[in-house]
Image: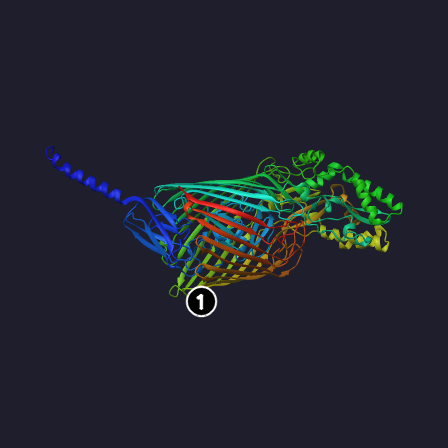
């Protein structure tokens, strides 16, 4: 045997040489270029995948792409929005020149959010909108998040420059707990707020791949917080998009603003991604945004008729309550008997712009680790953190300082299974309530009793001297305010710093909350095991944990221990194609059980019918729900003499049962004052005469909110497949709206008073405890609407986009005044035209936005938001040599100031320059 060994060594050596040679030939660096077949221009950001694997990349802005350590032979799959997909077999490492044929608009777009599985957008059973990467790169909006405002059916509400709130189909507010935001399938909400803080902890401009929006309820598949719809952000894969990317935006706002000078806004972002063969990849993102926020300075009087019976109106009204002035609201007023007449007088208060720091800062970052366990399974770990200094709007306006949200997430997925576990922690830092700051600055300077006493004494003195009533009121205010703290002085700064550290809104203004959210979910596609239909099943479980800070939250059951709030559920979805696959019918059923509430069943039925390969009809029915948020369930906030109390029995027992509706007491007190001032009736007689206006509360503890939604729609292509049409019509019925009712309860010393003395005590606010309780409206509310979107490929890459949305509050049953405010324009329209390659490496886009006037209602202010229109535009230049792009643009470039909500900021022009360098090294 040993003698034969030398004879086979040459054969072994030859074999090893052949293997080494083959290996050297089949592994190496491959470069290529992707171009438009008709024009020869580069196609930016085309996607290139190795067929049968998860290895992929994307073309740079000059159309070039590179694979390192690519094994040959292989087949590349190339796709780009607006072009026919193509497969190319690769057998050598020679540079490739790939040309794609221009295609009709929207033909091959794929979405996953509508049914939690991949499907063509044309075949989606419900309305779904999309912003792909090319649309994001071309938008003149300052950020991709801002670009949501131009998506069909989306209404954006700007509470501040860094806190924009998207919504669809009505019933919005600045803290929109009815609209869900996901990043790669993960909910990014701040637990205490109950919604996401805009994009403060979301993807950066460099890491966003595409955005999908579902207008309308998605509860059957996504559960809580998706009652009105959701937006889903998808990020770039580190396997496909590698290298170092840099983003810099520099802009200027507050142009020609009489209240402040011009300010710079700057945002810097970095992304680095690296893949190690086809096994391990990671990415890191960092972003820093700084600027100066829009100012909220609306001066409309919210209490204009308080002194109409004594003919004190407009600027002469001593109960003046400008929208963005705080410290002069209802708890800061008294009715003073002056010379036989009842006058309502408010403390002076402070304007928001004078006592608020409008500096905007947002530092955020994330890291993601991806590991391919096998060709079928991939594990991911992600960590996100965002730190924010900004203005936030809820029932009050808040200054967020060092507000931090961080999130850890783990995912395990294959082609059939996806499992997620994530943990979110929210800490409010050194934030404070702007309204409470104003109220307690006044009270720290001088107590209410002393201030109103000084006011009354000086008023009577001046009227005895023969001065007019209006002038006497002004002089009385000047006298009572002598020595009042003035913004910008050392004394003011010292007291302000003290107040914002006191965690009790009756004396201070601090917001000191801490909460966490633990969530786990799984989804299993069983279609390969069930031949008759497509079967998808899933589950989720969520646990909130809140630290009782003693002001915002308390634990009435176990003092000192965290409040816990749990919810779990599961769903099943079936789908099948019939009649030669022309008709697809799907049905989903979800069951959810929330702590303190009975279980809820949520069905969804839908049908999609293919008239042909380019035209589809759809219809659906969905039932949606929403459990109360943390704040709605557990809040316990003292603020200016009014306690805001959660609607669960453990929080509000004893209040619901024995209280009086505040609006009825306001009407009662106004009627008494009218009789005293105009008719000369004695106070006691006026109280007895109007006592029947008082109404006892009949509201009960909070229950889940519900919606029944019906929708029909059409998607299709026309005009030789150059025109894409998407239209829908919906009708919704809401029940159990979660809203707030304001009630007053007699103080402890007066609760045993005789029945005939109760009206006398209810006239005197000092003898009452005031509450704002979370409860449900007894009304059923119906709303309807429609939207249509058109995308037309005019010539080559010139594209015209337009959309029009209509929303209407149809009617109410049993109107009790607690229905959540509709707060939605009747009409919203967007029109844009653009071309990413109007000339060599030069592109442009112009967008016009218009929306109708509408009624805004909230506890902070009610009034008409005027109609407005604005113009956004950008011109971009690609620099292929350094894989760069420069974009010069502006939002509201005509600088026509507008606002989108009562008590919100006024929005002016912003002009910017953006520089992007993508995938270096």
Colour pattern of the rendering: rainbow
**Residue 57 spot, x, y in % from top left:** 38, 47
Residue beneath the point at 42% across and 51% down = 44
Q: Is residue 79 visible?
A: yes
Residue 452 versus residue 416: which sits nearer the camera? 452
Q: Nearer the viewer, residue 251 or 828?
A: 251
Quadrant of the drawing holding the C terminus = top left
Residue 822 locus on image (x, y percent): 62, 56
Numbered disc 1: secondary structure: loop
Does residue 517 lie above or below 591 as drawn? above
Does 599 appear above or below 447? below
Residue 384 in view of the camera: no
Q: Quadrant of the N terminus?
A: top left
Q: Percent from the top left, x then y, of residue 643?
A: 68, 43
* Picture mark count: 1
Residue position marked by numbered label 1 in the rendering: 719
């Amino acid at each position: 045997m040993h003698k034969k060994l030398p004879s086979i060594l040459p054969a072994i050596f030859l074999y090893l040489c052949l293997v080494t040679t083959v290996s050297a030939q089949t592994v190496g660096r491959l470069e290529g270029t992707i171009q438009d077949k008709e024009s020869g221009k580069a196609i930016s950001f085309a996607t290139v995948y190795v067929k049968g694997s998860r290895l992929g990349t994307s073309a740079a802005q000059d159309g070039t792409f590179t694979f390192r350590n690519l094994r040959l032979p292989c087949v590349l799959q190339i796709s780009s929005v607006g072009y026919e997909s193509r497969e190319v077999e690769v057998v050598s490492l020679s540079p490739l020149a790939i040309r794609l044929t221009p295609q009709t608009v929207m033909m091959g777009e794929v979405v996953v959010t509508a049914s939690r599985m991949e499907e063509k957008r044309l075949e989606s059973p419900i309305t779904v909108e999309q912003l792909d990467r090319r649309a994001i790169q071309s938008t003149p909006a300052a950020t991709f998040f801002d670009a949501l405002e131009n998506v069909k059916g989306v209404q954006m509400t700007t509470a501040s420059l860094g806190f924009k709130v998207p919504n669809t189909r009505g019933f919005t507010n600045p803290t929109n707990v009815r609209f869900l935001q996901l990043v790669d399938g993960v909910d990014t909400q701040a637990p205490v707020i109950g919604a996401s803080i805009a994009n403060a902890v979301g993807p950066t401009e460099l890491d966003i791949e595409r955005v999908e929006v579902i207008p309308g309820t998605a509860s059957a598949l996504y559960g809580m917080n998706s009652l009105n719809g959701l937006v889903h952000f998808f990020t770039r894969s580190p396997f496909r998009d590698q290298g170092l990317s840099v983003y810099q935006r520099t802009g200027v706002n507050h142009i020609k603003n009489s209240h402040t000078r011009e300010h710079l806004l700057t945002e810097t972002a970095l992304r680095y991604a690296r893949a190690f063969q086809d096994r391990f990849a990671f990415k890191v993102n960092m972003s820093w945004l700084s600027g100066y926020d829009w100012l909220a300075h609306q001066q409309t009087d919210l209490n204009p008729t308080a002194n109409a019976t004594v003919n004190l109106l407009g600027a002469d009204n001593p109960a003046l309550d400008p929208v963005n002035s705080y410290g002069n609201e209802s708890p800061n007023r008294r009715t003073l008997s002056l010379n036989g007449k009842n006058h309502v007088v408010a403390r002076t208060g402070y304007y928001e712009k004078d006592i608020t720091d409008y500096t905007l800062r947002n530092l955020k970052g994330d890291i993601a680790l991806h590991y391919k366990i096998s060709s079928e399974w991939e594990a991911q770990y992600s960590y996100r953190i965002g730190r924010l200094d900004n203005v936030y709007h809820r029932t009050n306006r808040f200054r967020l300082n060092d507000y931090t949200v961080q999130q850890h997430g783990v995912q395990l997925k294959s082609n059939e299974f996806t499992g997620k576990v994530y943990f979110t922690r929210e800490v409010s830092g050194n934030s404070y309530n702007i309204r409470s700051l104003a109220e307690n600055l006044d009270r720290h300077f001088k107590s209410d009793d002393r201030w109103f006493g000084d006011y009354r004494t000086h008023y009577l003195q001046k009227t005895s001297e023969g001065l007019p009533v209006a002038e006497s009121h002004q002089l009385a205010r000047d006298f009572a305010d002598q020595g009042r703290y003035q913004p910008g002085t050392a004394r003011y700064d010292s007291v302000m710093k003290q107040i914002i550290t006191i965690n009790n809104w009756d004396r201070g203004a601090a917001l000191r909350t801490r909460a966490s959210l633990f969530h786990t979910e799984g989804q299993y596609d069983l279609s390969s095991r069930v031949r008759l239909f497509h079967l998808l099943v899933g589950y989720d479980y969520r646990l909130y944990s809140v630290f009782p800070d003693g002001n915002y939250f308390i634990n009435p059951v176990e003092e000192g221990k965290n409040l816990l709030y749990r919810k779990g559920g599961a769903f099943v979805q079936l789908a099948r194609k019939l009649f030669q696959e022309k008709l697809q019918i799907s049905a989903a059923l979800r069951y959810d059980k929330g702590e303190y509430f009975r279980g809820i069943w949520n069905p969804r039925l839908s049908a999609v019918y293919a008239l042909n390969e380019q035209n589809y009809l759809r219809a659906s029915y969905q039932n949606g729900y929403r459990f109360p948020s943390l704040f709605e369930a557990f809040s316990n906030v003292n603020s200016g003499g009014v306690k805001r109390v959660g609607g669960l029995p453990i929080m509000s027992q004893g209040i619901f049962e024995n209280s009086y509706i505040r609006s009825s007491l306001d009407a009662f007190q106004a009627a008494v004052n009218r009789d005293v001032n105009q008719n000369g009736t004695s106070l006691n007689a006026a109280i007895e005469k109007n006592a029947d206006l008082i109404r006892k509360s009949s509201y009960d503890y909070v229950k889940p909110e519900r919606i029944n939604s019906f929708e029909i729609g059409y998607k299709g292509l026309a005009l030789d497949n150059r025109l894409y049409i998407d239209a829908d019509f919906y009708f919704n019925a809401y029940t159990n709206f979660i809203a707030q009712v304001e009630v007053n309860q007699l103080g402890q010393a007066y609760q045993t008073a005789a029945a005939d003395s109760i009206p006398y005590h209810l006239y005197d606010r000092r003898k009452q405890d005031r509450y704002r309780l979370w409860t449900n409206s007894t009304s059923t509310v119906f709303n309807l609407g429609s939207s249509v979107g058109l995308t037309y490929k005019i010539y080559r890459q010139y594209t015209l986009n337009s959309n029009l949305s209509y929303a209407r509050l149809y009617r109410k049953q049993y109107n009790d005044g607690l229905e959540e405010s509709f707060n939605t324009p009747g009409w919203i329209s967007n029109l844009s035209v653009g071309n990413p390659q109007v000339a060599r490496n030069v592109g442009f886009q112009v967008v016009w936005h218009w929306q109708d006037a509408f009624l805004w209602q909230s506890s902070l202010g009610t009034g008409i938001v005027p109609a407005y229109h604005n113009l956004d535009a950008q011109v971009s230049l690609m620099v292929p040599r350094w894989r760069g792009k420069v974009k010069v643009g502006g939002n509201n470039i005509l600088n026509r100031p507008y606002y989108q909500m009562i008590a919100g900021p006024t929005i002016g022009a912003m002009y910017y320059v953006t520089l992007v360098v993508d995938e270096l090294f």
